[in-house]
Image (cartoon, rainbow, N blue to C red):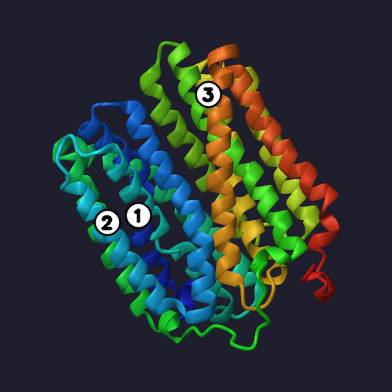
Amino acid sequence: MTALASAPGVRRLFALSMLARGPLTMLSIALLIHAQRLTGSFAAAGVVAGAYALAVGIGGPVLGRLVDRRGQTATLLASAAASAGLLGAVAVLPAGTPFLVLIGLAAGIGLATPPLGACLRTLLPGLLPDAGSVRSAYAVEATASELTWVSGPPLALGLGALWSTGGSLLFAGAVLLVGTGGFAAQTASRAWQPDRGAPRSRGGSLRAPAMRTLVIVLGAVGALFGAVEVAVAAAADGLGAAAAAGPLLGIWGAGSLLGGLLAVRLGGGAHTGAGLSLVLAALTAGHLLLVPAAGSVLALGVALLIAGAAIAPTYATVYSMVDRAAPEGTATEAFAWLATAVAVGASSGSALAGALADGAGPVAAFALAGGAGAIALIATALRSSTLVKSPALAVA
């Protein structure tokens, strides 16, 4: 942590990255409520928000690979300008705009979303003095990211209510453009150069067995996240306290913050496949506690605080493995694939949990979350050999 605080420019990079990534946590809900206002249909608005989320998952690895081949500056500036411009276009659309236009613009915003988190994580190993400092930095980044997810959706809803839904999108686009421009202007980002001599293949970072393992793990972890969000909302509604869903999810995020701070103090998370298994075991066990707690708002809040404590350490541990897991010259793409895995997993987990919550109640949805954590744990155990520190295992 000391090395992180004293490293020239690192704190500024962190601050600008978080500033630019804050609006990204607003966009799903902001696009949803704006599309609903324009179309008058929540079903249509859900499709628009889904198109955006799917496009983010597709565009992230593509832009990450472009960064790995062309550098950060041009890719970040161009993608931020395109995304902000499209947000502005959506913001000024009149009511009654054709549904397909909304879907196309939302997809364009997602495809152009700058891979800021991946770019920051790619820079850290070259800016910090040793592997321990890098692991701590990943833990700090995972912890700080929780703040953006806690603050982003309420900010989007607040701006939509106090100003307008279009104004919320304009605000998000402006902050995204300014923050990304500031990040791209930093010396570390401008000076970073891709490895021109690194071998290229169509498989990219996913040609490495270790990267495929990490993607599988975070896909399952994402499903856990999606299931919990739906299950908490269903449980709160079933208990006659629908308004408690937001605060309960905030408690879950607070647990992750506390777990991340502890991980920073302990060196930034686990270092090996066996260590990752232990972290995932804690993640799974903590979320299985939600099953017996589903009948009480108070018990659910306590269980969510405990369950959340393993989230940031899970991220920190996985991120720390990318440097040795990803083939040479593919680090940015690798980090982008991990974000895509979480997004796809969360979407799948939400859909399955919604069906379970309707048919069998929130307890079944919480059980799904625990099952997703168990899948991540089993995948790590079965594929632990791919996570061994060995250059021979770098490429399939």
Q: In the rendering, at what x and y percent does residue 14 appear?
A: 42, 67
Q: Residue at x 33, y 33 (%)?
A: 45
**Horizontal side, residue 148 vs residue 366: left or right:** left
Dots 1, 3 in contact, CB < 8 A: no
- In this figure, which residue is indicated by the disc labeled 2? 86
Please say whether residue 160 is visible from this viewpoint. yes
- Foreground disc of the pair 2, 3: 2
- Give the residue at mark 1: 109
As measured in the structure, the alpha-carbon distance from the residue carrying label 2 to the one carrying label 1 is 6 Å
Q: Is residue 130 above or below residue 312?
A: below
Residue type highlighted by circle 1:
Ile
Q: State the SS at label 1.
A: helix
Name the secondary structure under disc 2.
helix
Tell me which label, 2 or 1, sits earlier in the chain. 2
How crowded is the residue under tag 1: few (<14 C-alpha within 10 Å), some, or many (20+)? Answer: many
The residue identified by callout 3 is 354
Q: Residue at x 55, y 72 (%)?
A: 122
Image x and y of residue 168, in percent: 22, 46
Give me the C-alpha separation between circle 2 and circle 3. 31 Å
As drawn, is 211 to the left or to the right of 179?
A: right
Q: Quadrant of residue 44?
A: top left
SS of the residue under disc 3: helix
Task: Determine contact: label 2, label 1, CB under 8 Å.
Answer: yes
Asked if residue 118 is positioned above or below residue 91 in the image, the reply reads below
Dot 2: within a 10 Å radius of its alpha carbon, few (fewer than 14), some, or many (20 or more) residues? many
Left or right: residue 282 compared with residue 238: right
| One can see residue 3 in this view | no
